Structure formats: C-alpha cells, structure tokens
Image (cartoon, grey):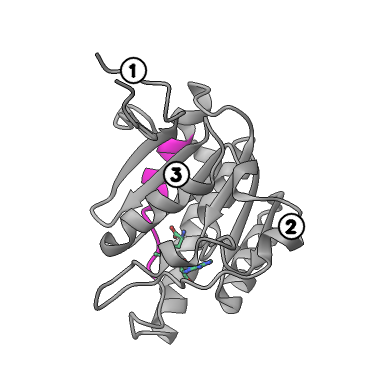
Amino acid sequence: MVRKVPLQELELSIDDWTVPSQLQPLISEASRRVADFSQKRPDPRSGFVPCGFETVARALQLIQVQQLATGRSFCEWGSGFGVVASVAALMGFDAMGIEIDEQLVEQARRLADDFSVPVDFFQGSFVPPGGEYVAERANGDFFWLESDSDDTYEELGLGPDDFDLIFAYPWPEEETVIDVLFEKFAAHGALLLTYSQFDSVRLRRKISSRSMVDG
Ligand SMILES: C[S@@+](CC[C@H](N)C(=O)[O-])C[C@H]1O[C@@H](n2cnc3c(N)ncnc32)[C@H](O)[C@@H]1O
C-alpha cells in the first residue's frame, strides 16, 4: 500500500551550534529596531512579533553546514524586519522576503542596506493564487496571516516552487495553513523551516507522495 507522506520531519539539533560572530551586530541592531518599532505600534493586532533571531540563525547554519537544502534559493514568507532572510543571505543563500506590510518592508530594506546585505524584499502576499482557500482556514482570535493572494509571484517571475528553503513564523492557529500551502505549492525536495513562539524550530522536507511505501 502506498502511504501519502508529503512532509518528512528532519532532526534539527541546534544546541551544539552558535551564531557566527559576524552576524551578531546585525541581530543586535535588528532587535533594537524591532523594540523601537513595537513601542510605536503597541497593539499586538497591528504590531509586530519577531522570531528568535539567534535560534533561527543557528538552524540556518546547521542547514548550510550539513548541506540539507537542494539548492541556494531561500524565501522568508512574511518577512517582517527581514532578519532571517538577511541572515540567510549572509550565510550564502540567494535570499528574499515577501511581506504584506509596507512599513515592515521599508524597515527590512533599511536594515539590509545598513549592513550591506545582498537580499531583496518584496511587498505583497506570499499566498499564491489558488492558495486563498487554504489561508482562509486560519481561525482564531489573534492571527497575522493575510489570506489574500496577489500578483507578487508574477512580479517576481518566480513561484513558491522555485525555492529550496522557505522560512515562516506562523501563529499556532496558522501552522497548518503554512504546512498545507507548502505541501501544495513548494517544490519536491524543498525544505520548510518554521519557528514557534516557544523559541523552537522545526524542519521538514517535501517528499513525493509516492516515495514512501508501506507494507
Ligand atoms: C509573526 S510575523 C514574523 C516576521 C518574521 N518572519 C520574523 O520571523 O521575525 C509574521 C509576518 O507575516 C506578515 N504577513 C502576514 N500575512 C502575510 C501574507 N499573506 N503575505 C506576506 N506577509 C504576510 C505579517 O505582516 C508579519 O510581518
């Protein structure tokens, strides 16, 4: 019997990894700017919640050193201040971020410029056309995911299946949405790195639905 196993969990033990020292100034400055920004937008519904930059940086380092990605193309879905995409770029990925909030795109571009990071940020939705019905499943009192799609990918001349590694920080109610969007639209072999609010990271690979045979 053929069992459908679209996302394969990969072990991600980041405890033995440290953040490369050359990334520390970027991370420290980003944390300072995020705190400043959040003070000006204190309502969590309109505010901004960043991931644990150091935790994600350690995960990216592990992925790079162990060559877990099938290529160098990286996208941060909902990139906020763009710190993860910037760190990925400094680690050798061809990195970009897609962010719906114009002010955050501006902040991400400014931070990257100030640290001369070769990374691009695009304003728009990472939800591809045809994925809106998946995104609308997000349900809860508090969530950040905008379910609308737009023509971001068309403008980029790229699709979600052009990335070897996608990072997202979904709210708990939205984890499934990110998983399903990734399962449906990412390339086979691509990696999904996610951060959860308890400062943990998870890494999964999209594998062929027929690549695991049971019995
Ligand atoms: C929890 S924050 C994480 C930000 C950043 N990735 C980080 O880890 O620090 C989620 C971000 O996704 C953005 N967002 C929500 N829905 C989006 C969509 N459909 N397309 C692009 N960005 C979106 C929000 O504006 C917010 O900046």
State which quadrant residue 144 falls in. Answer: bottom left
Is 88 situated above or below 48?
above
Range of magenta residues: 49-60
Q: Is residue 169 visible?
A: no
The answer to whether residue 116 is left or right of residue 209 is right
Could you say which is closer to the camera, residue 1 or residue 11?
Answer: 1
Inter-mark Cα distance, 1 to 3: 19 Å
Looking at the image, is mark 1 or mark 3 earlier in the sequence?
3
Is 202 situated above or below 44?
above
Q: Residue 183 got which mark?
A: 3
Q: Quadrant of the C terminus?
A: top left
Tag 1 residue: 213
Is 112 situated above or below 68?
below
Name the element at disc 2: helix
Name the element at disc 3: helix
State which quadrant residue 173 falls in. Answer: bottom left
- Outermost residue to the top: 215
The residue carrying pointer 3 sits among few (fewer than 14), some (14 to 19) or many (20 or more) residues within 10 Å by Cα, namely some
Tag 2 residue: 156
Q: Do the CB atoms of the residues marked 1 and 2 lie less than 8 Å apart?
A: no
The residue carrying pointer 2 sits among few (fewer than 14), some (14 to 19) or many (20 or more) residues within 10 Å by Cα, namely few
Asked whether mark 1 lies closer than 8 Å to ligand 1, one says no
Residue at the image point whose x is 42% and y is 21% from the top: 211
Image spot of residue 1 (x, y percent): 29, 20
Amino acid type, mark 1: Val
Residue at the image point whose x is 33% and y is 40% from the top: 202
Q: Is residue 7 visible?
A: yes
Inter-mark Cα distance, 2 to 3: 21 Å
Residue at the image point whose x is 57% and y is 43% from the top: 88
Q: Nearer the viewer, mark 1 or mark 3?
A: 1
Could you say which is closer to the camera, residue 90 or residue 158?
Answer: 158
